[in-house]
Amino acid sequence: MEKIGHLDIDWQAFNTKIDNVEGVVKKPTEYNWPMKQDTYDTNYKVDDHHYAQATSIYTEYVSDDLIKYFPKDFWPTVGMDGNVIIKVLEHEPGVVTQPHLDGYHITKEKFGLAEDGPVKRLWIPCTDYKFGHILCVGDDFIMTNYKAGDVFEIPGDILHSAGNIGVETRRIITVTGEALDKKGFKGVAVC
Amino acid sequence: MLKQDRLDIDWQAFNKRLDLLDRCECNAGPLLEHVFDKHNIDTLDLSDSLKDLLNKLNSEKQIYTSDTFVDDLPEGFLGRNQIDPKSTLIKILGLPSGTFTFPHTDHYTNTKKQFGLPEDAIIKRLWIPCMDYKFGHILCLDKEVVIDYSAGDVFEIPGNIMHSATNIGIENRRIMTITGAVVA
């Protein structure tokens, strides 16, 4: 995953607002283990596992106002138009996102996109890299050495998982929308 | 964490031996009380229920032990890694997907106790993967993540640096630790 840009905002102020749940709605993510199990059954084999409900639910912050943090001239640099879904995702120590592929169903439905995409998902850390903060993508990549605001694109058709086995909360932003530059992914039917 | 040696054994046969519990036994990881407090990371704002679950997941580890592991090492391996064969403890740790070893530093309590070593004995721990790197198999050591290794690569874990491990992949993870007193 190569860095494709940088979102240059006051990350300390941004994180303080999120800490204070200011202008955003904080909620636990849906426990979608059965859907993930479908992914496994359909797309690949998984050994016995212990992905438990309590450690597989992370926190998300949502608001239509999150887009205000993105300057208008940001969108052309990443091949998108600003019609996007933005979420702030948070993993406490010990919490993981199970291995999965991306389907982009909610984004396609919201913006009336064709079922075969292409859709792009940006991944933007809200803090510099810290001990135990993990993003695994495919067989040979783990995200490290990033700075708050670095912008990456998650290849949704490659198996990926994330988690926090450190001692500080992990917080990242995902931005999902149509890939106007066609450098996106169509998403998998079962994800 | 730099690779410092190779342990060249037949890893396929060794893993099969573990699968079959041939000349070894397998136990669950210990269910530790107050693990977060013990490792001085109790400032974490974690709910008690999450702490309990993390502790439980820690105990889902599979720990393989055997009286023969030390004798089965190739001749000269311990010597060239400055470890005393008479005070060497070898464990194989299996981490199924979704399990977790909480952040900790090493105190080598079991090794010191088993071999009657003094509290200030100088101990070394080698970390050796039993399989090539696979998706989601994670060892974090400070700001380093150890990946891109092959079965049998030998690393030394600096026990005074906080480290943690997990398997957020889809295949079981299995590693060997060799812990022993450093030969003067």
Image (cartoon, helix red, strand yellow):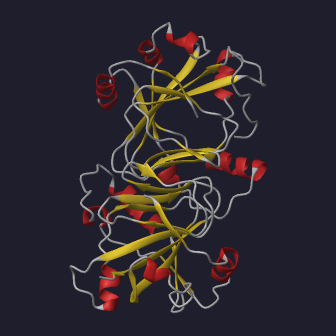
Against B47, is A150 above or below?
above
Q: Quadrant of residue A137?
A: top right
Q: Quadrant of residue B170?
A: bottom right
Relative horizontal placement of residue A144, taking residue A154 as reference (left or right):
left
Relative horizontal placement of residue B179, taking residue A12 as reference (left or right):
right
| Residue A47 screen position, x and y as percent | 67, 63
In the picture, the quarter occupied by the C terminus of chain B is bottom left
- Which residue is at the front of the view, B16 or A44? B16
Q: Is residue A32 visible?
A: no
Q: Quadrant of residue B81?
A: bottom left
- Which residue is at the front of the view, A50 or B153? B153
Q: How many marks?
A: 0
Q: Residue at x 66, y 16 (%)?
A: A111
Q: Is residue A103 visible?
A: yes
Q: Residue at x 63, y 62 (%)?
A: B132
Relative horizontal placement of residue B24, taking residue A149 as reference (left or right):
right
- Which residue is at the front of the view, A122 or B68? B68
Q: Residue at x 56, y 87 (%)?
A: B25
In the picture, the quarter occupied by the N terminus of chain B is bottom left
| Residue B175 screen position, x and y as percent | 54, 70
Against B36, is B87 above or below?
below
| Residue A102 screen position, x and y as percent | 66, 36
| Residue B121 screen position, x and y as percent | 25, 81
Against A42, is B183 above or below?
below
Against B2, is B32 above or below?
below
